[in-house]
Image (spheres, coloured by chain):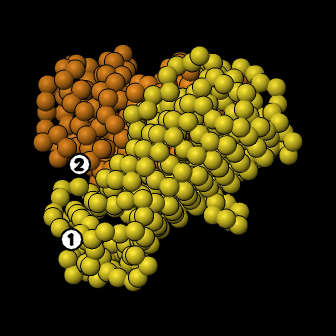
Amino acid sequence: MKKVILKLTKSVNHSDLRNLSMINTIDLNQKSISQIKIFVNRKESTVGNFFSIKISKIKSKTNEIEIHGCNKFFNYLGYRWKKDKLFINSDLGFNIGYKMISGEIKINGSVDNFLGAEMSGGEIYVKGNAGNFVGSSYLGVKQGMKGGEIIIEGHAEDYLGCFMRRGLIIVKGKVGKFCCFKMIAGNVILFKSYKSFLGLSMKRGTIFLMNKDIKNIGARSSKSFDFVEPIFFKYLKNYLKNKFSISLGNSKYKRFYVDRSINGIGEIIVRQI
Amino acid sequence: MTRNSITLQNTFAEAFPMKASRLIVTAYSKKWALEAANSFTGFATSVIACGCEAGIESVLSPKETPDGRPGVSLLVFSMSEKELAKQILNRAGQCIMTSPTSALYAGNISEKKINLGKSLRYFGDGFQIAKVLGNKRLWRIPVMDGEFICEEFAYQTKAIGGGNFLILGKTIDALLKASEKAVSEINKIKNVILPFPGGIVRSGSKVGSKYKNLIASTNFEYCPTLRGIVNSKLDHTSNFVLEIVIDGLTESDIISAMRAGIRSVINSDNENINSISAGNYGGKLGPYLFWLKKIMS
């Protein structure tokens, strides 16, 4: 397979890079990559005008695309990303991995709003922080993330997993308000604290709270009860350990259903340290 | 060909194409995983009347199972896709789901799917929950000991049934001993099962019968009590015959299993074992012919 390294050669203060995802489907050669049309600094241009392109052969089973020199004005990167691995060594703007289908995006920095919004497959890994609406639906759309996995090492802001339908979101840092608002299904694992209105209007789905704090749950919940030896949790632990080297540790759990005010049967599982 | 006073007859085992699926059963302990597996594979010796042939392929350590608990790998074989799907679903519902602490996963992957959790979920009466992790969809069905976890689909693959060899001997004691040793050697091999009780069958069959409705009947050529009245394949000292039937995923799996079993019998160096033969129907039953001498050469 091939490795493509794109290095930014000019300054950028606004960009829409959704067309760059064509790299999934075209022949990976200098000419075809440089001719991909992108919208940069509010003008239509081509990849060749803004990036230097270096292509080499690698032994990997998938193509690897590496982009250097990005900044917070790089938007829509990984839009409808179908295959291949995409590595970015800096911060990015909004709508990263929007409607992503498959493949892998690794970001060695932070991202703005709508990370992985409405994605249906693939993996997104963010080393830094993420903005609002991670894995959520776009404004006016009824279903958010429909599959795939998002791992955020840092913090995430408000409306994480809003209208989420399927998939897995892991946040190792803190989370903002209205997390999992109107969640339909899927899994969210929160390692640290969260702000108010967690699980509000949640229909189904699972929130794992590794932090014992349950003060800010906004949803009306059922009575909590001990959750002993959940086999699905064992499966999930094994899955996370094997795939992401994330250990949830051994502990007891409390479980309750939310949001009972709308007859929801979403579950919040809280680790009892 | 004679080795250690045991004659390897110049004949072949005849096998036929089947459909198969691998399932992984896990439970709280090895004991309960085996209980569920044994229940699932019960009454699954022959497609003649059981609908499928099934057996335990191997016992899995917690490191080898999807949920990190002790488990068992099962192989199920049937003649048609429809029958395989029916048998797996019925047995999963009645034998695995009912067994305490059990969970059920697909052990192989292919394009042909067999409903598992997709159908069993309705037992949850609306309280069932689907979870998608990676490329697998699991169903969490609430039951009285917690939750029954079941993968949405099992997967069907091509397979071969009816690999076999016959052990002919003077005494039943020697024959059972040699057969049991052969079974334990074959059980070490992956991708094969021995569907009969203890891996050994004494009622080897031929295709058809003098009775219209019977699709199989006793293999009279190897019945020692009929030696005087039929064209027997047994000499005057072969008083007992036992057969080992092998179902496997590929030809090479069956060859490996037959080789291990036959080698074990030969190495038993038992003077009460006369010869090793194989069951065939003159090449009419199936396209796979396993010549004993070729396997052991």
Label 2 neighbour load within 10 Å: few <14, some 14-19, many 20+: some
Q: Is disc 1 placed on a helix, strand or loop?
A: strand
Q: Is disc 2 placed on a helix, strand or loop?
A: strand
Relative to residue A212, is residue A176 depicted above or below?
below
Q: Quadrant of the C terminus of chain B?
A: top left
Does the image show residue B14?
Answer: no
Residue B40 quadrant = top right
Q: Which residue is mark 1?
A: A52
Relative to residue B99, is residue A90 depicted above or below?
below
Image location of residue B87, percent across then percent down: 61, 46
Name the front one of labels 2 and 1: 1
B189 lies left or right of B247:
left
> Which chain can be seen in orange?
B
Marks counted in the figure total: 2
- Which chain is mark 2 on? B
Task: Look at the numbered discs 2 and 1 and tell me whether their residues touch, using CB distance below 8 Å.
Answer: no
Residue B8 quadrant = top left
Task: Say what amino acid the circle numbered 2 marks.
Answer: Trp
Residue A64 quadrant = bottom left
What's the residue at 25%, 26% (across, down)? B265
Q: Which residue is mark 2?
A: B291
What's the residue at 40%, 68% (across, down)? A13
Task: Say what amino acid the circle numbered 1 marks.
Answer: Ser
Q: Which one is in front, A91 or A76?
A: A91
Label 1 neighbour load within 10 Å: few <14, some 14-19, many 20+: some
- Which chain is mark 1 on? A
What's the residue at 72%, 32% (across, down)? A216
Q: Which one is in front, A73 or B260?
A: A73
A18 lies left or right of B164:
right
Report how far apart the C-alphas of labels 2 and 1 lie in the structure: 64 Å
* Tint applied to chain A in the drawing: yellow
